[in-house]
Image (cartoon, helix red, strand yellow):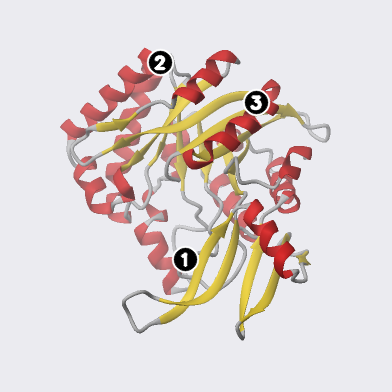
Amino acid sequence: MRILLVFILYFSMLSTSFSMENVFYVLRDQQQQALQALTMHKKIVNTVIFQAYVIDSKGNVSGDADKAVMAFGKANSIHLMPMVTNSKFDAALTHQFLANSNARKLALDTLLASCKKNQFYGIQFDFEMVPLTDKKLLTEFYREAADLFHKNKFIVSFAIAPTLKDDHFPTDYQKKLYTVWQGAYDFKKLGEISDFVTVMAYDQHGIGTIPGPVASLPWVDLVIKHALSLIPANKISLGVPTYSGLWYMSAIPHTTRITMHYNSLDYRTLQYIIKKLQPRIFWDDLNKIHFSFYDSAGLNKYIFIEDAASLKAKRNLAIKYKLRGISVFRLGIEDPDIWNI
């Protein structure tokens, strides 16, 4: 998720008897746009979670709380939670850290001191690209973190990968993905020790895949069902994307290879492309997503659009399964119409 903000806001759904908690992620390079959106909707904002800290292989913690975000939160009596990531999402560096008890203690003590100093509401950990072989170490570290922060009266959350199952992978791609990323998260144990988890239900299709939705509704449904088999619904926040996907053919620099390439698109850039090229936009009612393909120098480019319509469909799944809420990745690049939902 890189450097980002999250803000959580509460609202009552007319069609349900429980309150939904909506989380919005924002990268720092969208900080100005994000703060504008936060300001416009501050009356319903409950908590801001910003990814301020990175832990290196020796347990040193770098980064700091964003001053503008801190000021906004304090001025509006909004809870603040920093997000912590592993260095560069690098598997080798992360293993060195997780395998070193002294490094783990140094990092947690540093983070706890920061939470106390800044009077944060809690903390969220987002360790990614941790291999399956380090599953036990990651779980141990997360348990140490939960014990320490709960003892000091702080909320603890974990961002976890989307997983469909823990065995029987029908393709080599799915098996590899589980081995290098998804499998390291012990859903049952992390659900037990956390106050809530954010299940990042996106990038179904992305770098290394054929063109397809960032997060189709049937796939998201399967992600939810797997999570629910191991974690209580009131601890699951469903991650949904606001970025769209663009696929096209491209040469790989410094090689003789040509391959399918993928870029994520913010909504403003997407609208520029549509206005300029005027491709026909289709609605896929099964996957609940708009898409288009158009000719570019004799080859097709494909766009799968994450907008208010696709977000609403995913939010409705969260309502259907009575989840804690949704986590929208990310604020500042979204279709403005999502605020009408």
Across and down, in percent, residue 147 comes to: 35, 24
The mark found on residue 207 in the picture is: 1
Q: Residues within 10 Å of mark 1 (few under 14, many from 20)?
A: some
Identify the secondary structure beneath mark 1.
loop
Residue 73 is situated, as x and y percent measured from the top left of the image, at 54, 19
Examine the rendering and report whether any part of residue 291 can be seen. no
Residue flagged by tag 2: what amino acid is it?
Asn
Which one is in front, 74 or 194? 74
In terms of sequence position, does the residue under pointer 1 or pointer 2 come before the other?
A: 2
Relative to 271, is 30 above or below?
Answer: above
Helix, strand or loop at label 3? It is: helix
Viewed as shown, does residue 154 lie left or right of 10? left
Q: Quadrant of the C terminus?
A: top right
Is 97 left or right of 4, judged from the image as shown? left
Reading the image, the residue beneath label 3 is 39
Mark nearest the camera among 2 and 3 is 3
The numbered dot on residue 49 is none
Tell me the distance, in whole angstroms, between the alpha carbons under discs 1 and 2: 38 Å
* Residue denoted by label 2: 118
Give the percent coordinates (x, y) of residue 211: 58, 71
Give neighbour class at mark 3: few <14, some 14-19, many 20+ (Cα, 10 Å): few
- Horizontally, is 72 left or right of 216 in the view? left
Question: Of residues 146 and 110, which is closer to you in this image?
Answer: 110
Q: CA distance from mark 2 to mark 3?
A: 22 Å
Residue at x-position 19% and y-position 33%: 103
Q: Is residue 2 visible?
A: yes
Nearest to the observer: residue 313 or residue 207: 207
Query: Is the residue 244 above or below the residue 248 in the image?
Result: above
Name the kind of residue labelled 1 in the image: Ile
Mark 3 vs mark 1: give the one in front: 3
Residue in the image at 69% along x and 38% along y: 322
Type of the residue with mark 3: Thr
